[in-house]
Amino acid sequence: MRDRIVIIGNGMAGLKLVEELEAIAPGRHALTVIGAEPVPAYNRVLLSSVLAGETTRDAIALRPADWYRDLNCALRLGDPAVALDPATRTVSLASGATLTFDRLVLATGSLPIRLPLAGADLPGVVTFRDFADLDAIEAAAATGRGAVVIGGGLLGIEAAVGLAGRGVPVTLVHLMDRLMERQLDARGAALLARALEARGITLRLGAQSAGIEGDRHVTGLRLAGGEVLPAGLLCMAVGIRPETRLAAAAGLAVGRGILVDDRMQTSVPGILAIGECAEHRGTVYGLVEPAYAQARTAAATLAGRDAAYQGSILATNLKVSGLPVFSAGDFLGEPGTEAIVFEDRPLGHYRKLVIRDGRLVGAVLVGDAGDGLWYLDLIRDGRPISSIRRDMVFGRSFCEAA
Amino acid sequence: MADGSTPDMQVRTTCPYCGVGCGVVMKPDPAAPHGWRAQGDPAHPANFGRLCSKGSALGETIGPDGRLLHPTIDGRRATWDAALDRIAAGFRDTIAQYGPDAVAFYLSGQILTEDYYVANKLAKGFLGTANVDTNSRLCMASSVAGHKRAFGSDTVPGAYEDLDEADLLVLVGSNAAWCHPILWQRMQANRQRRGARIVVIDPRATATTDGIDLHLAIAPGTDALLFEGLLVHLAEAGRHDRAFVEAHTTGLADAFAAAFARAGTIETVAAGTGLRAADVAAFFHLVAETERTVTLYSQGVNQSHQGVDKVAAILNVHLATGRIGRPGMGPFSLTGQPNAMGGREVGGLANQLAAHMDFTPEAIDRVGRFWGAAAMAGKPGLKAVDLFQAVEAGAVRALWIMGTNPAVSLPEADRVRAALGRLDLLIVSEVIGSNDTLGASLAGPVHVRLPAAAWGEKNGTVTNSERRISRQRPFRPLPGEARPDWWALAEVGRRLGHHQAFAFADAAAVYREHAALSAFENGGARDFDLGAHAHLDRAGYDALEPVQWPLPAGARRGRTRLFDDGRFFTPDGRARFHVPGEAALAARPDADTPLLLNTGRIRDQWHTMTRTGLSPTLGRHLPEPFVEVHPADAAWFGLTDGGLARLSNRHGAAVLRVVVAPGQRRGSVFAPIHWSDENAGQARVGALVAAVTDPISGQPESKATPVAIAAVAVAFEAVIVGRALPDRRALETAGALAWARTTIEDGHAVLAAFPALDPAGWPAFASGLIGCGADDLTDAGDPAEGLYRAAHVRDGRLIAAIAMTAAPERPGWAHLNPLLGAAPLEGRARRAPLASRAAGGGPDPGPTVCACFGVGRTPIEAAIRAGCRTTDALGATLKAGTNCGSCLPEIRKLLAAETAPA
């Protein structure tokens, strides 16, 4: 009998695991994938593009249901797992079904954080995480009243740009005095702010949300100073937290996320965790690329190969069309580092490369992130950059001599 | 047809640069920057089809940029009529109030014989002043005076053929490889074909001393002593030609006695000249053993307060040995300017009257009758240096400057520039709209500016160093309201009431009258005789082939050599020996000014660069002003190669790039004369030169002025490339320690050095320098490496860019240049001006070595490393050095450096 593997979660990490596993051990395992959402995995990164009307839900679907079927992979959608019993190697689903596994992978992702404000449960108050959120946003946007987005991070900006792209007047409220403070330096954030304002988004930086106005539906956001920003839609995009409830209840070791080792193994043998729900070497990643790397490692582990995930160098890509922002590594530049800064002021393009000991350790790109992955490679390789130092800030094409 | 009036065919004309006077064929070429390409004229006997780098680039210098196109009066545009009226009235008033000697003309070896003739006639025959001098005074006045003292006439005895036929070529104070490249090639060809030997006497090693038989690095100012020693040695070796001396000369006994007393032994000569005795002996031996010896001399001889004596010492040797006027031998003055000789033919020096006649009563009478003169000048006028001192003193009140830039080129040039502001009437005839002489802010207003016809537009004749008259023919229409200089002069003559005397219909009419005057009551008494051209019609003038004078009436061809008959133009027909004064410099170095400044030219520029400076090709060779310093002096004064040095003395100062040159003589430094306030921050080398002149020739001692030198600390080196001319004030505001501009395709490049700058201020610094708002910049900085680059790209066009590196590194810029003309720069291509090289391109080619084929130093070095071990191999690989060959000395140096054992 084939090895029964159950994957809880049909997000980007869960799907990647199936792909990797089929690539290195085709047909060897009996796979079951459990998805909480009613549709197969889609590219969550492009949710804001759908919101902006630049693409469609169909277009961001990753694999059709047929694909799973052709692999003899059982796909159970809209039927979230509700309990996990490591002792009996079973998992229970909301529908009441129970699945037995030989090995199991948790790819449960994360949950959007909702601020504990009065009125947070009013209709029109949404987060921005999945198609269900998108439904709510689209419904509220259709009322024609303005929207307020709380959170000047990646997700909040994407939501705000998406709404603005639909013609909705948007105010973006952010607690910190600059946008994306965890991914951008001050200059990069300022340029991003300028670009957002150019798209008609009103920015309220350094603004603390105090309460949500409205009786039967949200009507506005009250700030700490008492000012009320009117809104028919309030989108909270203040962060995510790992979805660990199932694991914790099952007695797996959990910190911020489900603790895993370099082979993506949790504290219980035969149970692995990948993606945003996992905590590796103290780090929980909220980005797709580490999730994919973890999926590759987990596939190898499941296939009985040696593999070790070493952690990812963080790279952030803001993939709102026309607003490329990329950052990686030590982008702020700690003491002892050197910075190379490029700016095309009329175009609003900005780049900062951070060098330490003759090696690239961080990068911030605003306006044109085209060379981001090249910089990321350089950061990861850690190779000396003296031979390309003069031109590397302009991009790869300037460093490859004829 | 030889007439160049039809634009759709090639035109044969003559190069406007040095005195070699090469024939040029201008061919229409749609691919050339201004539609014309220069080639050597295979039929011209000066160059037989070859051209040097400067001549080859002539097509790049004929564009409309910067041309003066309309007359102005007091800075405002005016009609020619108004401008000419103003001049005529000004002359009349000045003469009425102060007398004729308050009017003066300062002319140029650049203007044509016809221009010179009319200026001379107007001044000396109708205004009554002999204050007609020229920049030739700075160039070869000492040779002229030396010739006249020895021969009784201003005659170059030989011809270029002698350089082909000599067995020994002695160059004294000449860097012919750079300054007379085509003649230098003829000498090299002789050397290869016939084995002629070459000796160069020059305090410093130059391109001319490269690969020759003997270089005598003589102590400055001691040339006469060396030639006195040679005179003695030749007597002892039995080489004096007694028959010639007795039949045709006078004064050898005195000259020999003086020479014997001062330079009687080789050891004495060696001690006095700073040379090794063995080298002196070798030189003397070579000359003694080689009858066919040509001694060529240039500014190293002429530009001296003893220039006439140096010439005498050289001529004495040739007269004593009878080596004159015969094939392959003779003294040969290499003229610096294209028409220095033509100017002298008409009397374009203040101490000559006209047509090789001096201010004798008979000559004044003769010329006065010929001209029908209204007011003949009765005595010599002021020579150049004295003339500008008279301007300063207020004695000269009205001055017409034509085709020259005295505010740069004269000694104590700062003082000259200031003096120009004292004139009641300053007239400048110019081709270009801006130079230091026209610079009104320092000199006071130029009252009348006249747009002159430029080379390629004007029509007339020039005479080269071998007495050969060649036509300069027009091939382009006159732009704007530009007019020939002779026309403007004649118009003033007519306005002063002398209609008949100045009724010239065209340049040919001027030439005819000039030829007729040369033959007037001549009868062989004067060397200069163009009688055969006294009735030359327009067609004959247009078709005139290059011809040597004398050419008396009836002669069918010119005379190649003079004095072959032993007949000189002194009253008794005998040549004169002269006793030179004791060789000494006008001023010795002292504690405050411990070094001697030597000045000169570089290979690819001409005079103050108003013409060659327009050529991108020529600008790439040596794009900025420099001072060559001996390594020991550099160490002593704390100077580093590529750093900056400030030269100063009580006359002026200059900040120049240091070139540590082992070939430089210790205690002497060398700086080129070409840069001015038009194209550099503070590089007017003429400002440092003391106005000390030869008492006879009036030529200044431009090659040995005591100066102080001090290092200037540089933090950043920068290059700015842009479409517009750089803003001098912006560079000063930005704190530039030194800067220099060079023309590049589609714009200009500025090389500049700066003191320390706070990186936070870089964008403001850059936007100030390139003239845009800080928000218009595209820039990149790497403060840890001291790198900063910025560009202004507008509507996809690169307007300007700056690249900055921490000294001593200097930013490359060759790849920036093409971006000025590049297709629209959009998106990422907007970064190209900031990159250290083109995207996907190779490294910077470095400074240009071969101007003809645009080959930089980097590819040459790479080719050598790749196995090219000879100049021929490099030529085959890169074409470098295969055209004019004037870069071969540099290529040989690179070969030596790259192949030297580590």
Image: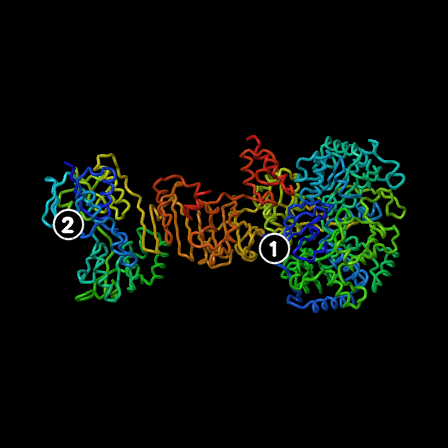
Q: What type is the residue that disc 1 sits on?
A: His
The amino acid on which the numbered mark 2 sits, given as a three-letter code, is Pro
For residue B34, the mark is 1
Q: Quadrant of the N terminus of chain A?
A: top left
Q: Decide: is B184 above or below B238.
A: below
Q: Judging from the image, what secondary structure is the residue with disc 2 in?
A: loop
Residue A244: x percent and y percent? 18, 47
Give residue A224's position: percent from left, percent from top.
25, 62
Asked if badges 2 and 1 are on one and the same chain, I answer no
Front in this rendered view, residue A307 or B598: A307
Q: Which residue position is annotated with label 2? A: A80
Q: Nearer the viewer, residue B756 or B322?
A: B322
Which is nearer the eye, A28 or B159? A28
Label 2 environment density (alpha carbons within 10 Å; few <14, some 14–19, many ≥20) = some
Res B4 visible: yes
Judge left or right: residue A10 versus residue B460. Answer: left
Crowding at mark 1 (Cα within 10 Å: few <14, some 14-19, many 20+): some
Q: Secondary structure at mark 1?
A: loop
Q: Is residue B556 left or right of residue A225?
A: right
Compared across the picture, whether B75 is left or right of A354 comes to right
Q: Pointer 1 indicates a residue of which chain?
A: B
For residue A367, which quarter of the picture?
A: bottom left
> Image quadrant of residue A221?
bottom left
Q: Name the subunit of mark 2.
A: A
Q: What residue appears at the point 68 percent right and 57 percent down from the top-left corner?
A: B6
Q: Nearer the viewer, residue A48 or A116?
A: A48
> Residue B265 at what x, y percent from top left?
79, 32
Location of residue B179 in the rendering, given as x and y in whole percent from the top left corner: 68, 45
Query: Does residue B810 sit above or below B72 in this rendering?
Result: above
Is residue A109 something that shows in the picture? no
Q: Is residue A102 left or right of residue B759?
A: left
